[in-house]
Amino acid sequence: MLRFEIRNSGETWHIMLEGRLTGDDAEHVQLQITRCPVSVKLIVDLTEVVFIDNVGEQVLSFLGRLGAVFVAPNSYTLDVCERLNLSVAPNGISPENALGSRHKEGGHFRTNRSRLRKK
């Protein structure tokens, strides 16, 4: 099962992934990201990812080619990012400020709805 959330803050999209980045779920993430404007900056948070299969690695590579910066705070996700030569945010940098500040509106961040898919 994979859960992902896209937080749109104007010039930056924060993609939060949770669970297993595999198969059809990974391809669905790629499809959603292809809808973002070309000029948008991507930050992909892998903090809660527990497993990535070959299809998931292909999707991460695709996101890397789009210029995404990855938040990979644990040894598993950091190893995957290093093997795929992906750009990783420095330690201690949160996804909110890895590429720029998030915009607040009335104390709340603008977000899109979460999508939960079950297999």
Image: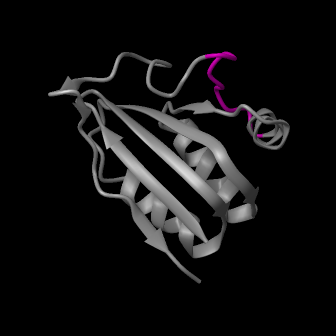
Total numbered labels: 0
Of residues 108 and 90, the one nearer the viewer is 108
Which quarter shows the N terminus? bottom right
Q: Magenta region: which residues?
A: 84-92
Q: Position of residue 111 (x, y in %)?
A: 28, 44
- Position of 107 compared to 3: left or right? left
- Position of 110 compared to 52: left or right? left
Which quarter shows the C terminus? bottom right
Is-magenta flag for residue 109?
Answer: no
Residue 103 falls in which quadrant of the image? top left
Residue name at image x 37 percent, y 59 percent: 114
Residue 84 falls in which quadrant of the image? top right
- Position of 90 compared to 99: left or right? right
Of residues 88 and 54, the one nearer the viewer is 88
Q: Position of residue 69 (x, y in %)?
A: 55, 29
Residue name at image x 82 percent, y 38 percent: 83
Give the farthest residue toward the left. Answer: 106
Of residues 103 and 33, the one nearer the viewer is 103
Q: Position of residue 9 (x, y in %)?
A: 27, 31
Q: Is residue 80 above or below residue 2?
A: above
Report the magenta stretch's main SS. loop
Residue name at image x 60 percent, y 33 percent: 70
